[in-house]
Each structure stands twice: as structure tokens, then as C-alpha cells.
Image (cartoon, rainbow, N blue to C red):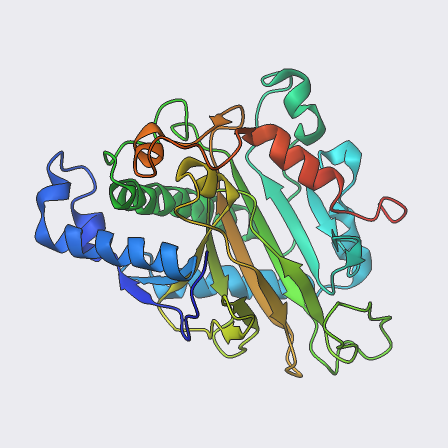
Amino acid sequence: MASNFKSIPIIDISPLLSKYDDPKMAEDPDVSEVVKQLDKACKEAGFFYVKGHGIPDSFVKEVRDLSRKFFDLPYDEKVKIKMSAATGFRGYQRIGENVTKGRPDMHEAIDCYREFKPGMYGALGEALEGSNKWPDLPSTFNSVMEEYISLLTDLARNILRGLALALGGLPDEFEGDRAGDPFWVMRIIGYPGISDSKGLEMPENGIGCFYYPISNKMFVTGLLTLVNQDEEIPALQVRNQSGEWIWAVPIPGTFVCNIGDMLKIWSNGMYESTLHRVINNSPKYRVSVAFFYEPNFDAVIEPLEFCKQKVGGIQKCERAVYGEHLVRKVLTNFDFQNI
């Protein structure tokens, strides 16, 4: 359960990354300090910034710039990579096609998933079978995004090693059958500004605001998310225990990280995902690239034994199969009349 935090903590993870392959990393005092901060952040906020991650700022910015160039294209060009059930729900969706709890979200996006061979997961993975649909323009979009995915996969895996230590396990606790062959999801998202959204039919969003684009309130259903957000446009908000919305303002050189429901189950409720939303009340168009590092697609998620022992052996969270969890979310996440 999140506390009444008033800000999102910033954690320098460079000591963790420098020792990621050291079998004695847990004994390093600098690593121990990072682990302590991760534990505190996950228990109190469910969100944190990471700096010292080793990915050049110029490359992180290039990813956002290419995303913006794509969204600036005419609709007829963007729709060439239109998402549908036939594409495995991979590709472009226009504003309002993504739905959260029955209400359309005011953003457009490209959705990408880790590719896998048809039949690899049987009926469980059938809905998401397909190849990612990369646009022809900008011409470097495909190569840059694939490099970015590779870098963030490695980064997330190393952060997860720190989280394993924070929970009281070994650094490789989430390897093997749990997340040793991780699935991933990436959403490249564009939020229109106030001036861009004039004339759009805005849905009621549950908090009494109709006059600027808002993403509906949401939890993250996966494991660990790294968000690359525009540096000049505050929009992401996280709700604390008292119901106050706390701004996760853009901080250059950082990613915003948040934990998902699969980590909640593995931790037996020690860590919980936190309700958050996006409100772009700026006149500027906002770009955000969210990378979701996930368990193995067919992983059975249930509380870790050492986490249960901390509460007298009581299991507080029900088991789940990650792939079933994801597919269920995807199948209820879009307006099928439009796609």
C-alpha cells in the first residue's frame, strides 16, 4: 500500500549496474544502499526515478524525437501500420481506440510486443502472434527502436536484480522459469495538447475534467515499467494513500520506473502497483515511450516462499499466469468497432 508520499524518489543505480555480474554484489556497501532505496521506494510509492543508468541522454532523446516525427505524419501515412486483431494487436491506433475501464483514452500510439514463433505458447499466445509493424517513415525508426528495446531489456533485468535483493532473495531470483526469458511490451504514445485537441470528443474521465486530454486512471499489470517522457511537459501523476495526485515531473537523465501487479504477487503484497494517470494540460503535443519488462510469457506467478515467511507463511496474493493476464487485458483494451 502506497504511503502519503509527497514526491517520487530519485535513485542512482550506477553502483548496482557496476556490480550486476558480481556473485558477491549483495555484500557491496554501495549496492546495499541502492537496494535499501529501492525497497523503500517500492513500499512507499511504487514509483521511482532511476539515474546513472548508462544509456546516453542523446539516444533517449532520439527515441522521443523519432516518435514525434511519426505522430506528425498525416493520418493516411500512420494508418499504414494500423493495429488490428489480425496483426496480433501490434501497430498504430488513433486517438480514442485504446480503452481503459470502458472509457477511451485521449492518445494515439504504436503498440509493440516481443515477437515469438507461431504456436510457441499454444492457445495462450495465439492472440498476440505476429510481427511488429514498424513504419517506413522516419527511415531509422525500426533500427533505433530495436536498439532501444535491447538496451532497456538489459537495464530492467539489472534493476530487477536489485529488487530481488530488496525482497530478501538472491540477485537471480527472477531468472529461470520466472523471468529468465522475459516478455516485453512497448507503447510509443502521443498525447495531443489543448490546442491540438479542439474539436475532439472528450470522454468523461471520472474526475470531472472534459477540457483537456487525459489518460484514464490505471495500474500496471506487469512487472517493471521504464518511462521515457518529454522533458518539458509535466503530465504523469501518481496517487498517494490519501488520494492526492503527485506529479512525476520530467527530470533529464532519468527514467520513471513503476512496479506492476506481477511483482505484487511475487512479493506477496509487500510491493504494490500504484494508481496513476496522465494529464496533458499543456498546449504542446507530448510524447512518452513506456517499456514494460515482463515475466516469461508462460510463467506461473505466485508468492515467493521467502516473502510468505515474512508474514508467518500466509499467502496474501492469488497465483496468476502472466500470459493469461496480459491477453485478457489486451482483449478488453480496445474499441473493436474501430479496429
Position of residue 109 in the picture relative to residue 10 (left or right) = right
x, y (%) of residue 251? 40, 73
| Residue at (28, 41) in percent of width and height | 161
Identify the residue at image location x=27%, y=32%.
Answer: 172
Outermost residue, front direction? 312
Left or right of residue 140, residue 16 in this image: left
Choose between 300 and 278: the one closer to the eye. Answer: 300
* Residue 77 picture quarter: bottom right
To which quarter of the image does residue 46 belong?
bottom left
Is residue 223 toward the left or the right of residue 92 in the image? left
Q: Nearer the viewer, residue 122 or 219?
A: 219
- Side (left or right) of 28 relative to 165: left
User: Where residue 249 sits: x, y (%)?
Assistant: 46, 75
Q: Nearer the viewer, residue 155 or 43?
A: 43
Image coords of residue 57 (percent x, y): 36, 65
Q: Quadrant of residue 320?
A: top right
- The mark tally for this picture is 0
**Residue located at (50% from left, 66% from top):** 241
Spot the residue most to the right.
Answer: 337
Residue 97 visible in the snapshot: yes
Residue 138 appears in the rendering: no
Q: Which part of the image, by quadrant, shows the C terminus? A: top right
86 above or below 46?
A: above
Residue 73 percent location from the top left of the image: 72, 64
